[in-house]
Amino acid sequence: MILQSHGVKDLKVVEADHRRDELEFMNTLKGMTELKTVPQIFVDGKIIPGDKPGCFDRLDALREKDELKPLLANAGVVDSEVDLPPGTYDYDLFVLGGGSGGAAAALEAARDKSKRVAVADFVKPSPQGTTWGVGGTCVNVGCIPKKLMHIAATKKEEIHDLASYGFRQKSDGGEVQLTHNWQEMCSSIQGYIKNTLNQGLLDGFEANGVKYYNKYATLKDRHTIHLDDGKGNTETVTARFILLAAGGRPNNGGYPGANEHCISSDDVFWLKEAPGKTLVIGAAYIALECAGFLNGLGYDTTVMVRSMLLRGFDRECVDKIDAYMQKVGVKFLRGCVPDRFEKGSSKKVKCIWKVAGEEKSEEFDTVLLAIGRTGEAQKLGLAEAGVWFNPENGKVPAPAEQTNVPNIFAIGDLVENRPELTPVAKVAGKKVATRVFKGDLQAMNYRLIATTVFTPLEYGMCGLTEEQCKEKFGDDGYSPYTKEVKPLEWSVVPHRAADAFFKILVDNNTGKIVGFHVLGPQAGEITQAMAVAMKMGVKKEQLDSVVGIHPTLAETMTMMSGTKIVGVKCES
């Protein structure tokens, strides 16, 4: 951030912990500089010396001695626009992308009524022709419709619990049974998205003086944006600052027949017909969430998995999710990848794959590909503006949200090595706005960002997994505390088990909680509260001293110490 505030151009930041060869990289760096710690700062190929022997310089010492600015200038790394008048542009800030992050940045910037702010958002149809309104992935084809369909599925699951609470159908006295109408559910969800979220955002832009372009934006240079409405009409505008917030789109893996016969998460929430028998291909959270709600709504659902589920999450928790999904009816094809897709004879799509060289196939009404997403960087004309990007993943390196071109910023799913989460993009977008217009140099903090996977058994987590604890602290450097529990609402239901689960991971050296994991109903609500405590550095002994709210599932995390009393079936 200090270097960026001095107008350094083409700043490259190497985050060692994001490299697969981290250990080798650090050993090589140590061999070059004889320093064991990072960050290490190089200007024009030479490391900036520290005030203390064997220690990197924090830059602030150089800045306080008025030595940093001339050092950078002499090295020729300062952007040519530094110290020049701002110039005359159509807009002070132009945002490419009207998703959660881009919208948050635009509206934050528009608080200053002297600033001219604009947003361009244009959705190109998916291979299946699906398109949607302003608001980005989260609002239209991500978090919001996903969570609502998850809620619908959990409500159906809860119907089976009603008999234990005395509910019966009046007609025959049997257990409560309902039918589900896909079209009616989608109509309700889509109506909420269009009438409340899409329109609400447009109304917000208008009320705050933000110019909205329903046009596809690309860069012509570092200050010029080309706009295309898709109907043959184009125009160009200029801006002092540009924010890239175009996110990403699903990829189809390059499998033959995928574009013709398969859908993605861009399509599933806008299907006009019920999906029927469905194959979900993928093992990350999008695949498992979609498989979970489709199965829960009553559709025959199979997940094809190449290797492990939810890579990067706590393995003990993932294994419990795996078992629970199988228990509620989700089927798995493991160790498989598709070979190709063809038109089916009895159903819409035929999926062909191989096992030990032998070709297998099955037909489905719907095949949903959830095998990854690619950033939109290659489609934005970034090369014209001199902005670096990674052509392999379509993402932009943007340390502290600034690209290598000092007046161009990037946030959200478009940025390399950042969590692909809506709240992350929103906070980062607001940070950019306050930085460029108010001089706020406090960087976005990407540590301890909580998240929840909305699988049938919800999974909330914050901080480290147990695997990461072992790697960071060693087997004896941390302590895990776990507890299985049956939520009260399940206690009178015979077919329910003690499937809820808590795990707390503690750094033995400091006593601080470094990892929190919970499986069960409303896991996200519980995790959000714990994330605040972890941000404040909560210790295990402090959590133990909290008086829980009884009876709740969340109180379990205040009772994670000691040993179970023999013969006692309830805990208080």
Image: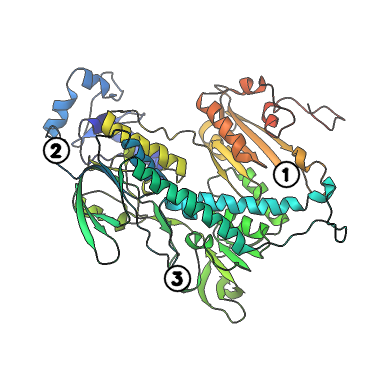
N-term mark: 1 or 2:
2
Which of the marked residues, 3 or 2, is nearer the chain's N terminus? Answer: 2
- 3D distance between C-alphas at marks 1 and 3: 39 Å
Residue 16 drawn at (x, y percent): 38, 39
Is residue 262 in view? yes
Quarter holding the C terminus? top right
User: Which residue in the protein does label 2 denote?
Assistant: 81
Q: CB atoms at circles 3 and 2 under 8 Å apart? A: no
Residue 471: x and y, percent?
52, 37
Task: State left or right for residue 262 relative to residue 408.
Answer: right
Location of residue 187 by image quarter: bottom right
Indicate the amino acid at tag 3.
Asn
Disc 1 to disc 2, C-alpha distance: 59 Å
How are the residues colored?
A: rainbow
Identify the secondary structure beneath mark 2: loop
Choose the circle earlier in sequence order: 1 or 3. 3
At a point 33% along the width and 39% down the height, the residue shown is: 401
Estimate the spatial distance between the alpha carbons at disc 3 and disc 2, rounded to whole Å: 45 Å
Residue marked by disc 3: 259
Above or below 502: residue 382: below
**The N terminus, quarter of image:** top left
Mark 2: few/some/many CA within 10 Å (<14, 14-19, 20+): few
Contact, CB < 8 Å: mark 1 with mark 3?
Answer: no
Q: Which residue is mark 1?
A: 499
Please give left or right for residue 272 compared with residue 404 in the image.
Answer: right
